[in-house]
Image (cartoon, rainbow, N blue to C red):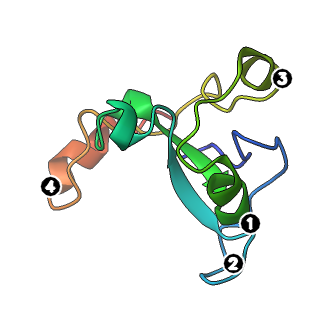
Amino acid sequence: MSQNICALCGKPVDKSLKYPDPMSATIDHIIPIDRGGHPADIDNLQLAHMKCNRDKSNNLQTEQQTSQVSNRNLPWLIDWKAYRADDKASQKNIKK
């Protein structure tokens, strides 16, 4: 996955940091599950720092936040819709 920027604050995410570090990587639901967002829809997921995700809580991003920072338009290295972790043949769909 080429996204290395927090979708909420716009700062780089160091994926080597592990929980409970507040700057560790986590997945944020753009539309929170308790507000009707699908928990596994790839279009509803984005990379975020754990602290930023906690601060956002179950709120929706405002239009201003969305226009300022977003990693949703960055190129993807893997076609995640075709990817299957246990299927080596599907990993051939990786774009170079």
Do tag 4 and tag 3 residues touch (Cβ < 8 Å)? no
Depth order, front residue of 6/32:
32
Mark 4 / mark 3, whichever is N-terminal = 3
Q: Which numbered marker is on residue 14?
A: 1
Which residue in the structure is indicated by mark 3?
Answer: 68
**Amino acid bearing label 1:** Asp
**Amino acid bearing label 4:** Asp
**Amino acid bearing label 2:** Leu
Q: Residues within 10 Å of mark 1 (few under 14, many from 20)?
A: some
Q: Residue at x 67, y 33 (%)?
A: 71
**Is residue 79 at least partly visible in the picture?**
no
Indicate left or right for 27 with 25 as reference.
left
* Residue 51, position as x, y percentages in the image: 71, 63
Mark in front: 1 vs 4: 1
**Is residue 91 at least partly visible in the picture?**
yes
Which residue in the structure is indicated by mark 4?
Answer: 87
In terms of secondary structure, where does tag 2 sit? loop
Q: Residue at x 71, y 29 (%)?
A: 70
Which residue in the structure is indicated by mark 2?
Answer: 17
- Gap between marks 2 and 1 measured at Cα: 6 Å
**Amino acid bearing label 3:** Gln
